[in-house]
Amino acid sequence: MNATVQLPEDQRQRCEVWTRVMGYHRPVAAFNPGKQSEHRERRHFNEPGGRN
């Protein structure tokens, strides 16, 4: 069963997303607008036999 819990707006908190670019971990919010757009277009996948 997949129950979804919705918090009231006053209890919500922004989540900072970090990603690895060229060997460094950086927050996506620090990217320029072009790099942020590129990050949104990325496709995620799981490699067979890899870690989940």
Image: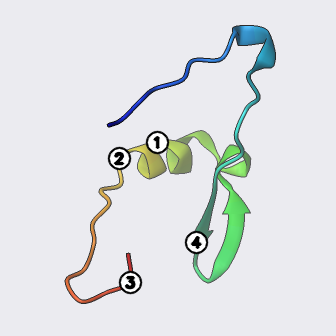
Residue 9: image location, x then y, percent? 71, 10
Which residue is labeled 1 in the image?
37
Q: CA distance from mark 2 to mark 1?
A: 7 Å
The residue type indicated by label 1 comes to: Ser
Whether label 2 touches label 3, CB < 8 Å: no
Badge 3 or badge 1: first in the primary sequence: 1
Colour scheme in use: rainbow
Residue drawn at (27%, 66%) of the image: 45
Disc number at residue 41? 2
Quarter where residue 13 is shown = top right
Q: CA distance from mark 3 to mark 1?
A: 27 Å
| In front of the other: 22 or 27 | 27
Report the amino acid beneath label 3.
Arg
Q: Position of residue 41 (x, y in %)?
A: 35, 47
The local crowd at label 1, few if under 14, some if 14 to 19, many if 20 or more residues have their Cα within 10 Å, is few
Which of label 3 and label 4 is nearer to you?
Answer: 3
Helix, strand or loop at mark 4: strand
Residue at far front of view: 1
Q: Are marks 2 and 1 in contact (CB under 8 Å)?
A: yes
Q: Which residue is mark 3?
A: 51
Label 2 packing within 10 angstroms: few (<14), some (14-19), many (20+): few
